[in-house]
Image (tube, helix red, strand yellow):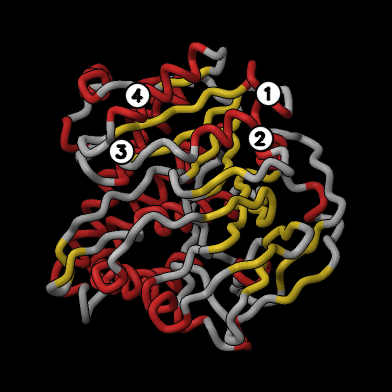
Amino acid sequence: MAVDIVVTTIFEPDWLEGYLENIRTNHRVDEVTIRIICDQMTPNSVYLAANNAIDRGFHIDCPSLDEQSAYLKKLGLEEDYIPWNTDNRRNIGFLRAWESGADVIISIDDDNYCLQESDFIGSHSVVADGNPNRENLSQAGGKPWFNICDMLESEVRDKIYARGFPYGARLSEHQATLSPLDSATKTLPVSVNAGLWLDEPDVDAITRLAQRPKISSARPGNVILDRETWSPINTQNTGLRREALPAYYYIRMGYPLGGMTIDRFGDILSGYFVQKCVKHLGHAVQLGSPVAEHRRSPHNLFKDLYHELAGIVIVEELLPWLQELRITGSNYIDAYACLAENIDANAEKFTGFVWDEGGRDFLRQTADNMRTWLSTIQTIGK
């Protein structure tokens, strides 16, 4: 089994050593490649740390900025298709992982630290196991939404919700309940595995400003989402089976919407779009292990709020449409292509705040980017 870990970074490489130690401890050095995608603001210490890890026998892919540009050119992509100084650079790592033939692709953030008591790679490898261990598993169903933060023990009294969880779905009548796995779900292959976080949960700026939540522990066990039940999925600690990667293009941000500039929701939209394809193809999404420690990098929460507000409005109104949409396709490439066509064709149906001021253009451009992504995946080949 070949496993690729993809990370973008503009900070010091303090996160790296913990993953290397976990990989070595669990005897996975030969199967794991860490793909570090640097940006124009990345310190030179990241390249030095990558070379040091290579000298110690680890498999590290840390292309220089010139090498990244040459790689995009080789694939026939315009340089601005994946803009500099954005988390969209993660797509380069995804493309290189696809080209390498990786069976499992794990996306992490550089402020998520590996816990040594876990087998980080082993936990995510459920997406590559044709007959995964279904012990200590529950099924979330009966209603359209499951709050992944319910799997966390918070130090605040009030309930917290994950970033990207629609505000309109936060009433009890929309909340799924947990039950033992039914016979049909027990046999579904897991295509996406979303891990959890300690210390700083992945919540939006509104929640962080109002509640300042901290996470002391994660509840034991994993949860499989019912086919009709959804949850936000990010790129912080998320594993995918190879065949699902064509449906996991990291959505480009930076568009003007309603006087704002959308940001910090590229991974959220990516997570919902791949989830749509997973459900259509009869596969499963699992939430739970592994758990990482989120030592959140410095943020201006008011700036985060400014950028997130447009994303909050987008998902609030787009997701009901997405949930009801019927797509076609017998594989992830065809299903994602169908999704892109439907986003493009239905953009005009969305009207009102943000939609009238850039929102529909954002959907059309996103669909076009999705099609370019699929074309590139197919150019690389299987």
Disc on the earlier residue, 1 or 3: 1
* Residue 2 drawn above or below residue 164: above
Disc on the earlier residue, 1 or 4: 1
Question: Measuring 60% from the left and 68% from the top, which residue is drawn there?
Answer: 215
What is the spatial separation of the Cα atoms under label 3 and label 4, in whole angstroms? 16 Å
Disc on the earlier residue, 3 or 4: 4
Residue at mark 4 = 47
Residue at mark 1 = 28
Question: Given contact means CB atoms under 8 Å apart, are the residues at marks 1 and 4 in contact?
Answer: no
At label 1, which amino acid type do we have?
A: Arg
At label 4, which amino acid type do we have?
A: Tyr
Residue at mark 2 = 121
Quadrant where the image shows the N terminus: top right
Question: Measuring 21% from the left and 67% from the top, which residue is drawn there?
Answer: 359
* Residue 307 drawn above or below residue 369: below
At label 2, which amino acid type do we have?
A: Ile
- Disc 1 on helix, strand or loop? loop
- Disc 3 on helix, strand or loop? helix
Q: x, y (%) of residue 248?
A: 45, 44
The answer to whether residue 238 is left or right of residue 266 is right
Kindly identify which numbered label has been placed on residue 312. Answer: none
What is the spatial separation of the Cα atoms under label 2 and label 3, in whole angstroms? 23 Å
Residue 378 lies in quadrant: top left
Kindly identify which numbered label has been placed on residue 89. Answer: 3
Disc on the earlier residue, 4 or 2: 4
Is residue 116 visible in the rendered image? The answer is yes
Q: Nearer the viewer, mark 1 or mark 4?
A: 4
